[in-house]
Image (cartoon, rainbow, N blue to C red):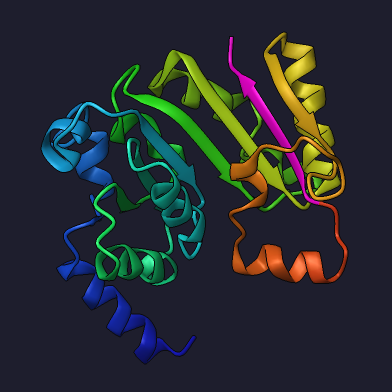
Amino acid sequence: MGSKNKLKRFKENETFENVFQPSRDELVNGTFPLKRKWRKDIFKNDNPLVLELGCGKGEYTVGLAKRYPNKNFIGIDIKGARFWRGAKTALEENIPNAAFIRTQIELIEYVFAENEVDEIWITFPDPQIKYQRTKHRMTNLQFLERYKKVLKPSGLMHLKTDSEFMHGYTLGLLHGLGHEILYANHNVYKLEGSPEEVTEIQTFYENQYLEKDKAITYIRFKIN
């Protein structure tokens, strides 16, 4: 994407009522006004709050919001020029239960209050295979602790990935830490009984993986 195009999207994001771009200082200093008020001030209902972390173009956030009108969905990514597409689609198609936040996943506990979130989706994260990159792996111990802070005690986690490494790493970690694995499937499109929200909503890159006959994996779990 050219820098002109990026700039245009950044500017457009600023005008979108469903896009929020808090500064790091605002979050860390505790002055971000929407923490613990997402349902009341933004969605104006008491419906469950669901996050998609590293939402990319926002296709999954929008797809889930269409499928579940009685839940509120927020896509989070540091790359605003990417989720511009999802935010624009949500406005054009009048999908009031989809919103987007431009921030780093590491700051999630500053964006949401304790027990404010009902579910978290992680879709096609960078597996960060090299050992020295484990601190950026989105299902590592530190990230799981962050998610636990904002999730309700009964909150659900979902990991959907094309990376067998990420799937295996996460399963091993969850088993080792004694977390509750509710469902695990190493090839959701080939095995029967896969959850519909996992197979019916597909991202742009996911379609490319499927064309190459690459297995898509999925885990649903709870952080104890």
- Image position, residue 190 (x, y; %): 87, 48
**Looking at the image, which is closer to me, 183 or 69?**
69
Question: In the image, is 224 to the left or to the right of 44?
Answer: right
The answer to which quarter of the image holds residue 111 is: top left
Report the magenta residues as a range: 216-224
Query: Is 78 placed above or below 29 here?
Result: below
Q: Quadrant of the C terminus?
A: top right
The answer to which quarter of the image holds residue 131 is: top right
Whether residue 131 is in magenta: the answer is: no
Which residue occupies 79% across, 15% down?
Answer: 175
Query: Is 65 placed above or below 139 here?
Result: below
Which residue occupies 41% across, 41% down?
Answer: 68
Query: Is 107 placed above or below 67 here?
Result: above
**Looking at the image, which is closer to me, 205 or 77?**
205
Query: Is 209 placed above or below 97 here?
Result: below
Q: Is residue 137 visible?
A: no
Question: In the image, is 159 to the left or to the right of 7?
Answer: right
- Image position, residue 214 (x, y; %): 86, 60
**Looking at the image, which is closer to me, 46 or 11?**
46
Q: Is residue 171 visible?
A: yes
Which residue occupies 33% across, 18% down?
Answer: 114
- Image position, residue 77 (x, y; %): 44, 54
Main SS of the magenta part reads: strand
- Image position, residue 2 (x, y; %): 45, 90
